[in-house]
Image (cartoon, rainbow, N blue to C red):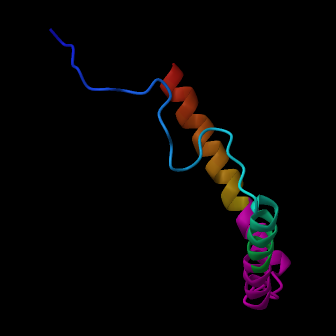
Amino acid sequence: MGGHNNFLPNQPWSPAGGWFFIPKNAKSNLAILSLATFAISYVGYKFSEATQVQSNTEVDDATIARWNAAAKKSREASAIAKAAGSA
C-alpha cells in the first residue's frame, strides 16, 4: 500500500546547480547586470528631467484670501456636523 519499487535518489539533482551554486562568471554577470540597471535608470532620470513641467504662475493675494475663507467655512461646517452627530 502506497509503496513502489522505483529508485528515488536521496539527493535529487538540480539542473540549476543546487542551493548555493555560484557559476564561474558570477562576478561578470553581476557587473553587466549592474551596468544595465544603472544605464536604464539614468535614461529614465534624464527623460523625466527633460519632460518635467513646473508651474510659474503667481497667485494673487485676493485668491489666497478667498481660498482661506472657503477652508475656514468648511472647517466650521465640519465641526458643526461632528458636534451634531455626537450629541
Q: Is residue 13 left or right of residue 19?
A: left
| Image location (x, y in percent) of residue 77 | 58, 44
Residue 69 to residue 41: above or below = above
Q: Does 63 appear above or below 68? A: below
The chief SS type of the magenta part is: helix
Whether residue 53 is situated above or below residue 65 in the rendered picture:
below
The residue most toward the bottom is 50
Q: Identify which residue, 43 or 64, lies in the foreground.
A: 43
- What's the magenta region? 40-68
Indicate whether residue 15 is drawn in magenta. Answer: no
Res 69 quadrant in image: bottom right
Residue 77 vertical position relative to residue 82 in the rendered view, above or below: below
Left or right, residue 36 beside residue 82: right
Quarter of the picture containing the N terminus is: top left
Residue 21: give x, y in percent of width and height.
67, 45
Task: Name which quarter of the figure residue 39 lies in.
Answer: bottom right
Kindly identify the residue that appears in the image at 78 percent across and 84 percent down: 54
Report the residue at 74% width, 66% height from top: 29
Q: Quadrant of residue 67?
A: bottom right
Outermost left residue: 1
Left or right: 86 as drawn, with respect to 27? left
Image coords of residue 71 (percent x, y): 69, 56
Q: Nearer the viewer, residue 31 or 13?
A: 13
